[in-house]
Image (tube, rainbow, N blue to C red):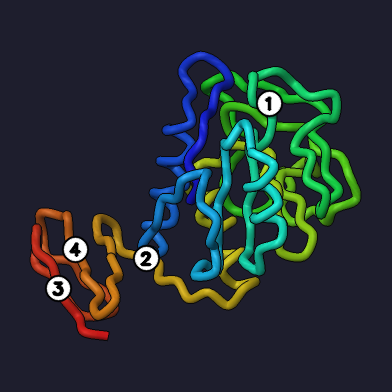
Amino acid sequence: MLCGIFSHREGLSYFGLIFDIYSSLRRLGFSIDFLSPEATNFNDYKLIIASGVMHTPDKLKELLLNSIAEILFGPRSNAKSENMYIETKLPPNLPKIDVTVDRVQTLRPDINIPLEINGNAKYYIEELEGKAVDIIKTSSGISVLKSKNNINYLGSWLDGNGFDELFISLCNKINLDYTVMPYGVRRRETTDHYYWFNYNENETKTIIGSIKGADFVKIKK
């Protein structure tokens, strides 16, 4: 996951978006690496998320677009120049996928837009145009995720169910194994072991057996 700068309406933040994405990936049992925008080697990764990076340096954009990993841009990726103004060519300005953000609709805090899949778009939704294939749409047919080959652009901040469905779809596309974790249970992977942590007060059943409350299990690979 790449780090960047995010700004939209009052009360929203880049870190809020990334935390929602992080939480979804953790619910699917993944360990996550946070990478600097100055990173140059993505060879060890199958899925790279560049959401909310408002200014994407040309070198980074080229590296991501030429990577063999599945790449998720958006929302708000490459929306501003280095000096934080809107470029003449509308975002996300990604040469390998035909998608353009025509405008952005801000939503009231109490309004969610249902998706065709499980979940909702919230806070805002970008109006996406272009010939890239629609992978996720709202229940009324508005494009939310466009894709071409391994490049994807997401045009909204999703709720938890929406992000879960999105990442399950991407994992299935690239045959990346995931495990839907029980509530309050998370897994971390190291070179040699898996660690399953139960943050619940009570014992919780998992696919590896029961874990006592506030305890963990270490499993050798």
**Disc 1: which residue:** 80
Q: Do the residues labelled 1 and 3 touch (CB within 8 Å)?
A: no
Between circles 1 and 3, the one closer to the viewer is 1
Secondary structure beneath label 4: strand
Looking at the image, how many numbered discs can be counted on the residues?
A: 4
Q: What residue type is labelled 1?
A: Lys
Disc 4/disc 3 C-alpha distance (Å): 7 Å
Give x and y (percent) for residue 88. Answer: 85, 24
Q: Nearer the viewer, residue 200 or 16?
A: 16
Q: Which amino acid does label 2 sit on?
A: Gly
Q: Disc 4 or 3, which lies upstream in sequence? A: 4
Q: Disc 2 or 1, which lies upstream in sequence? A: 2
Q: Which mark is residue 29?
A: 2
Q: Which amino acid does label 4 sit on?
A: Phe
Disc 4/disc 2 C-alpha distance (Å): 11 Å
Q: Residue 197 carries which label?
A: 4
Q: How would you rate the neighbour count of disc 4 (Cα within 10 Å): few for under 14, some for 14-19, many for 20 or more?
A: some
Disc 2/disc 1 C-alpha distance (Å): 33 Å
Q: Which residue is drawn at 76% across and 51% down?
A: 146
Secondary structure beneath label 3: strand
Q: Disc 1 or 4, which lies upstream in sequence? A: 1
Q: Which amino acid does label 3 sit on?
A: Val
Quarter where residue 87 is shown: top right
Quarter where residue 96 is shown: bottom right
Q: Residue 217 carries which label?
A: 3
Q: Is residue 199 above or below residue 124?
A: below
Along the horizontal axis of the image, is 169 left or right of 215?
right
Secondary structure beneath label 1: loop
Q: Which of 94 and 62 is in front in this view?
A: 62
